[in-house]
Amino acid sequence: MKRNIGFFLLAILLSTPIWGQRKVHAQITGDVAVTKLVEKNIEFNDQIKTVPGYRIKIASLSGTNSKTAAFALKDKFLATYPDLTAYLVFDEPNFVIKVGDFTNRLDAFIFLQRIKSVYPGSIIQDQVYPIRLNWDDLIPEKDSDAEE
């Protein structure tokens, strides 16, 4: 019994500081220069139209005749998959071939599984590339009933 009373008193004593605390409201004011930098960053991001996406790196070639081999490999890929885009980039000292403009990782992974047997060292890489607008999608279709 004495033990239960002891726990009860201990609990009351330990909770007393919680009852005595007050809430303090703070207002943070920043420098005008910081606000201007944030606004410039927002403006810059609005001007640069990019979209995150994924590409598959199918090869990275270096050494003698690597440029010729890279162009040949790119042409071979495009002959097999004409609906995709292939990119050849010189990333010193390598010629890197990346394919596709996938908007999500799942689509890139599905395609990677299709080509893995032909291009065994292929990997998915995150990319940020410019938005390509299809102007036909931006022009609304005319409703033939509304014109009559």
Image: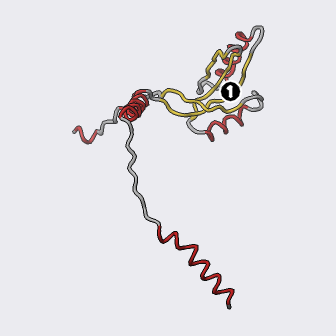
Q: In which quarter of the image is the C terminus?
A: top left
As displayed, is residue 78 above or below residue 128?
above
Residue extending farthest top:
64
In the rendered image, which quarter contains the N terminus?
Answer: bottom right
Q: Position of residue 77 (x, y in %)?
A: 68, 22
Q: Is residue 26 above or below residue 99?
A: below
Specify whether 54 is left or right of 34: right
**SS assignment at label 1:** strand
Badge 1: few (under 14), some or many (20 or more) residues near its Cα, within 10 Å? many
**Residue pictured at 62% horizontal, 39% vertical:** 105
* Closer to the camera in the image, 91 or 16: 16
Q: Where is residue 42 in the image (x, y as percent from the top left)?
A: 41, 33
Residue 47: name its quadrant: top left
**Figure coloring:** secondary structure
In the rendering, at what x and y percent does residue 90 appear? 65, 15
User: Looking at the image, which residue sits at the far bottom?
Assistant: 1
Total marks drawn? 1
Q: Residue 122 appears at what percent x and percent y?
A: 72, 29
Of the pair 140 and 31, the residue shown nearer to us: 31
The amino acid at mark 1 is: Lys
Quarter where residue 126 is shown: top right
**Residue at the location (69% across, 16% down)?**
95
Closer to the camera, 79 or 14? 14
Q: Name the residue under label 1.
A: 57
Q: Which residue is drawn at 40% across and 56% down?
A: 25
Pick the front one: 103 or 52:
52
Q: Which residue lies furthest to the left in this view?
A: 148
